[in-house]
Amino acid sequence: MDWHRWHQGYQEGGKLQERLRIVQDQLRLALAAVPPGPVQIISVCAGQGHDVVGMVSGSERRGDVRACLVELDGRNVAEAQRRIDDADLQGFEVRQADAGITDTYDGAAPADIVLLCGEFGSLTDDDVESTVATLPQLCKERGQVIWTAHRAAPGLFEHASAAFERHGFVPVWKDPNDPFGVARDQLVARPREFRTGQRMFSFADEQTLIALGRTI
């Protein structure tokens, strides 16, 4: 998958822009729910930073936000950094690294808000489970997670929703009429100590995803 070319969909209009709007709306609400003071955000597989940079740059709380955007594709990293610089967001950093290992988040976790937008459609059910199971290490107390799992992928949204419930989260928002499967959950269990050296996920190969019906 050429993830740099994939992001051209944001300029072409249509489905990606609509999903972006919903994600940014939920990020705006999540940010408003965090008490006054510093806010830490982690964006997993952040791409070009359209969601976080685009929303926070126009927020009254932009000065409160410290954000760590994790992305492996160097072209997307450069574009995300350009957006950050253009918006003059002093508390933002982009890490070019594997988003699937906890080492990458050392110094950025725990966060008030974690974004997982687009990953689940490229994972097996086991890796969706292990990713969600690790989130209590990445979240502060009452931390919120904004995530997506396209409803056209058979059973994916339901599996992810159940995983969040199993690992100490409660749903804050989801819309059954939203085809993109955007959701926001909040950690109600106790956060867990952050540990490096753990693999949360690896992207599945194309044949595995086709067999799972996850070709969105």
Image (tube, rainbow, N blue to C red):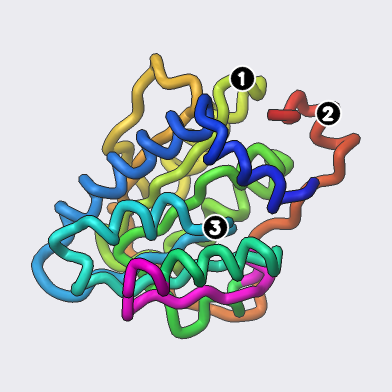
Determine whether label 1 and label 2 are within 8 Å by CB. no
Is disc 2 surrounded by few (<14), some (14 to 19) or many (20+) residues within 10 Å? few
Is disc 1 surrounded by few (<14), some (14 to 19) or many (20+) residues within 10 Å? some
Residue under the image location 24 percent in, 50 percent down: 30
Q: Is residue 55 above or below residue 151?
A: below
Determine whether label 2 and label 3 are within 8 Å by CB. no
Residue 103, position in %: x, y? Answer: 61, 79
Amino acid under label 1? Ala
Residue 100, position in %: x, y? Answer: 66, 63
> Could you tell me how far apart the alpha carbons at marks 3 and 1 are, in whole angstroms?
24 Å
Residue under the image location 61 percent in, 19 percent down: 152
Image: magenta residue range: 85-101
Which label sits on residue 48? Answer: 3
- List the residue tagged with mark 2: 210
Amino acid under label 2? Ile
- From the viewer's side, name the closer residue of 210 and 171: 210
> Could you tell me how far apart the alpha carbons at marks 2 and 3 are, in whole angstroms?
26 Å
Asked whether the viewer can see residue 199, the reply is: no
Q: Is residue 146 above or below residue 75?
A: above
Give left or right: position of 87 versus 124.
left
Give left or right: position of 160 versus 60.
right
Q: Earlier in the sequence, mark 1 or mark 2?
A: 1
- List the residue tagged with mark 1: 152
Report helix, strand or loop for mark 2.
helix
Amino acid under label 3? Gln
Report helix, strand or loop for mark 3.
loop
Q: Earlier in the sequence, mark 3 or mark 1?
A: 3
Q: Is residue 207 above or below residue 28?
A: above
Residue under the image location 53 percent in, 40 percent down: 10
> Could you tell me how far apart the alpha carbons at marks 1 and 2 are, in whole angstroms?
13 Å
86 in magenta: yes
